[in-house]
Amino acid sequence: MFGITCIARIAHGDAPSIAGHIALGARASSTSDAGYGVVFDDTSSVRVATEGLIGLRFGRVVVGLHAGIATPLKFSSSPQYDSGEQVASTTSTIYPFDLGLGVQVDAGGGVWLAAWLGATVSVTRASSPAMHVSAIDFTGDIPAASWSDRTTNLGFGVAVGYDFLQNQYGRVAGLVTLESQAIGPIPIRSNSGSTGYESESQASRSITIGIAYRY
């Protein structure tokens, strides 16, 4: 009976438990250069971002599902033009959502590391006003237009955290995260009125400083 009890205790102690973290912070980001046309990044200098990991703990390591979302990216774009031309213009908003495999490792002394690799799903909304175009490739009136799209691209990130508060309910930590998200091409409208996208995809690279709760 004693032996069976010891085996049961060891098995119970070795069993994986549910663990992870949830974080909220301020994010600063930048995007890669555009390929064709004129694209301006109108995104606010500081965005709000939240992300989390839920998974199973195996000793010092937690493996599970990562998810993250942030306030949107914003852009304005127009075709290449010469001085004095009146060209079509487009404003767009991109909502990125991250989903992938995540891992969290306790390094000791309250320090922990996290990383994720997966997909960034970008939902894009674009609009262009009605206007009179006077350009080398087209002259005339074009009506207002709006369109939307969704793309899925690669995303990944790494983070380092430090636990500064711990009690029976969990741990509170400071967290710094570096991420790269491929968000797809930026919407652009031609001077003739047709809607489309930049010839090259954009990537958003960001740093986020925030607070995390670990459980």
Image (cartoon, rainbow, N blue to C red):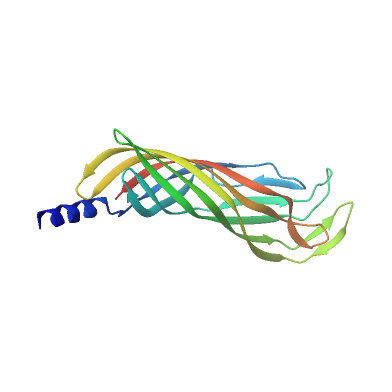
Q: Nearer the viewer, residue 185 or 59?
A: 59
Q: Residue 70 placed where, x, y %?
A: 49, 52
Residue 212 in the image: above or below residue 124 = above
Looking at this view, is 31 or 151 the one in front? 151
| Camera-nearest residue between 195 and 110 | 110
Taking 130 as reference, is 63 above or below it? Answer: above
What residue lies at 54% left-to-right and 46% top-to-bottom? 44
Query: At 28% from the left edge and 54% from the top edge, which residue is drawn?
Result: 15
Q: Quadrant of residue 90?
A: bottom right
Residue 144 percent coordinates (x, y): 72, 65
Q: Residue drawn 13% across and 53% down?
A: 3
Q: Position of residue 46 (x, y in %)?
A: 49, 43
Residue 82 found in image quarter? top right
Return the x and y of residue 48 as percentages of the image width and height.
46, 49
Give the left or right position of residue 142, taking residue 100 as reference: right
Residue at the extreme left? 2
Q: Locate residue 200 relative to residue 94 in the image: left or right.
A: right
Residue placed at 56% from the left, 54% from the top?
Answer: 120
Is 45 displayed left or right of 64 in the figure? right
Badge count? 0
Specify the quadrant that holds the N terminus. Answer: bottom left
| Location of residue 5 by image quarter | bottom left
Q: Residue furthest right?
A: 136
